[in-house]
Amino acid sequence: MRFEKRFLLQRLFFIGFWLATCTGFVSDLFWQHGDSSILRSASLIVVDIILLFLALFTVRKAFDVFLISFFITISLISTCFLNHSGFFSWLNGLRYFFGMLFLVPILRFFYENETRHALFVKSLDRQLYIFLCLQAPAVLFQFLVHGAGDQVGGTMGDGFSGVISISIYLTSFYLLSKRIDQNNILQSLYKNWIYIFLLFPTFLNETKISFILLVVYFILLMPLDRKYIIRMTFMVPVIGLLVGVGSYFYMSTVSGSERLEISEEFFENYFDADLDDLEGAMEYAENNYSEMFDVPRLAKFAIIPMIFTVHPGHHLLGFGTNIYAHGAHMEASEFYQEYDWLLNGTSPWLFSIYMQLGIIGTIWSLAFFISLFYRKNPIYRRRNLNAQFFLFVVIFIMFFYSDHWGYANFCYIALIFNFLSWEKPSREELPP
């Protein structure tokens, strides 16, 4: 009976993984971009149902129950009582957080038992390798058809260029680090060149964050010990070469792209203007450029005080979890209808969570991320410091870069990476 339960939950987990990470490409390929939301929406609903089902069978720890129940409570109060939205609107907005809420306890289920953990990781490694290999042809095809840009999202599809780049680095880092002989770094890199080669798609989609992750990737491949400086000396030429190649690809692919030029004068007016002027500027941009204007990330932080001045009383619990959640069958919230020019485009995670759930939601979010690094399993309690520091860098960047934590595909990759960063102690590390 135990084996059947583990087998069923593991199969469902991977079905959700592939639906979350590959449906976008299939949707864009066959339905183009006009009707792609039909397949995408259906797959996302299935993924959410799978996550909810798995969570019902795996959430057992008191801390997990507390995190989930506390979040559900504050989101319900904020959305339905403070901002007067309907129950189904709240439920639709809650789906935005399903990956964060449920994947951690689901993954914890697989490393509570050594046999269960071994079987899961064996299958996981194989499927992560397949996922990594699929990105190369998918990204190359999208690049040749659309050019560098948001549409180059690999198997995740249009709009997921940033998510796929980070996912490629995390997946490649995990698979390569397992195969590195710390006494023969360069030889190991040569033997496992495929994992480095499969990083090249990240330079075909305009994601500037790739340059940061590329450097962090190679710095953290080596253990942080006394020999680190010596090993790093040999790695500097490799890092320099790859950064140079990546820069060449990046400049070659984006030099002809149409980009909205923002002058220094525009920035000065942008930060100094009042809310009405900013809204007018956004409306002008939307009407005069072929692509939707994306308010600069840091500018969104500057606008926050203006928003809360116009709408006092929302600092603690924000404007509800439904401000980003709307579609053909779900009417947009009043807040979104008024500030769509601000909410559209890329939003940093801190901006996103603060606007939705205010100070309390932001504190909850910080507690969630801290728990990823401090909640040890009795069996797998040894930290892989390199992997955890890599994840910390990604989390920190996301605070000011994008709200990828609202996407199930990103949560799958990032939280799997966290799960794999906890290892079983060696015999020398065990207490006598």
Image (spheres, helix red, strand yellow):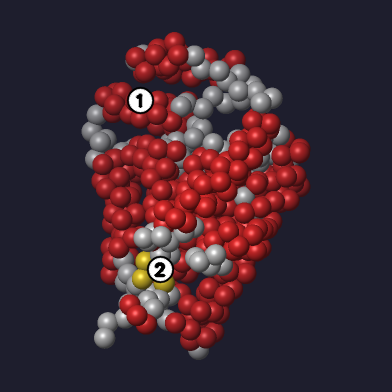
Q: Is residue 96 above or below residue 59?
A: above
> Residues at badges 2 and 1 in contact (C-beta under 8 Å)?
no
Classify residue 401 as left or right of residue 142. left
Kindly give the residue lying farthest to the bottom in the view shown: 1
Viewer-side residue, 117 vs 214: 214
The answer to whether residue 91 is visible is: no
Q: Is residue 112 left or right of residue 134?
A: left
Label 2 crowd bin: few (<14), some (14–19), many (20+), radius 10 Å = many
Look at the numbered disc 1 and give the secondary structure of its residue: helix
Q: Which residue is mark 1?
A: 303
Residue at 71% of width from left, 39% of height from top? Answer: 143
The kind of residue tagged 2 is Trp
Q: Residue 69 or 348: which is nearer the viewer?
A: 348
Question: Mark 2 = which residue?
Answer: 422
- Choose mark 2 or mark 1, whichever is in front: 2
What is the three-letter code of the residue carrying label 1? Ile
Instruction: Where is residue 14? Give x, y as percent.
Output: 58, 67
Residue 366 image point, x, y percent: 30, 50
Image coordinates of residue 355 in percent, x first then y, are 35, 37
